Image (spheres, helix red, strand yellow):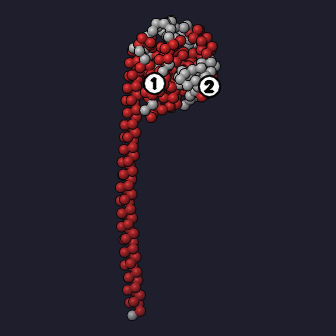
Amino acid sequence: MAGDVELSQALLYARELKAVYESARDRERALSTLYHRLRGAHQQALRYADELKQLYHRMQRATLQSLLGLANALEARDPYTLGHSQRVAGLARRLALAVGLPDAPARAVAQAGLLHDIGKIGISETILRKPGPLTDAEWAVMRTHPVVGARIVAPLEFLSEEAGMIRHHHERVDGSGYPDGLRATAIPLGARIVAVADVYDALSSDRPYRRRFSPGEVVTQIERWAGQALDADLASAFLTRLHHGRADAAL
Ligand SMILES: [Fe+2]
């Protein structure tokens, strides 16, 4: 009799254990299904994020292309500056890399080089192409271009650093430049780099009011302006790393 009771008790436990086991197994299956769904959703979200990122980069490139189109339109108005922005961009990028800037900041400096004079788009051709010295009033107009250029790119968040470089590319390290009269390292590094490349290319090109300087004269001018208009270390790095040994070659 007692044996029958123990047996039925044991059977009861076994049934309960089986029920607990089956319930745990069902929960595990449900959790596993949920996990796979979540993983699928996570991967889908990652794909969406990736597509969004690509779309954002495509939009950035398209916007930049439009700005470059604007810069090219500007140069087309003035044959003397044809190719100037491209050359300044290339030189500025190489100088940035030569003084140790990593790739991404050097690319930003190059972009600022491409767009540095975009603010001249609003300046009349009579001033831009004047074959002689500008009057004070004309200079006042000409000096607005860094601020106008910075304003053109300011709404574009991905060009925020470049906007600063564009605004300050005519500052001079002795504080006598424009628009803000910044001195030395208060001038953004990228703006000081673009300034060296800009001056070098301007001296090496014909202008409506003068012929290009010879390679030797270009070096003399840059050395003279080092520490006054141009950052001395950058001017020196430019001459030693980028210029010497290929004075008569297109840099
Ligand atoms: Fe300029």
Mark 2, residue position: 184
To which quarter of the image does residue 121 belong? top left
Q: Residue 174: where, in percent of width, then height?
A: 62, 21
Q: Give the number of callouts.
A: 2
Q: Is residue 107 visible?
A: no
Q: Residue at x 46, y 7 (%)?
A: 131
Q: Would you place residue 24 above or below residue 123 in this image? A: below
Nearer to us in this view, 129 or 54: 129
Along the horizontal axis of the image, is 78 left or right of 222?
A: left
Q: Are marks 2 and 1 in contact (CB under 8 Å)?
A: no
Nearer to us in this view, 151 or 72: 151
Q: Secondary structure at mark 2?
A: helix
In the image as oriented, which residue stretches furthest toward the front?
A: 137
Residue type (three-letter) at the residue carrying disc 2: Ala
Mark 1, residue position: 148
Q: Residue 34: where, in percent of width, then height?
A: 37, 59
Q: Is residue 73 visible?
A: yes
Q: Residue 8: where, in percent of width, then height?
A: 38, 86
Q: Residue 112: where, in percent of width, then height?
A: 48, 25
- Which numbered disc, 2 or 1, marks the residue that appears first in the sequence? 1
Q: Residue at x 48, y 7 (%)?
A: 132
Mark 2 vs mark 1: give the one in front.
1
Q: Secondary structure at mark 1?
A: helix
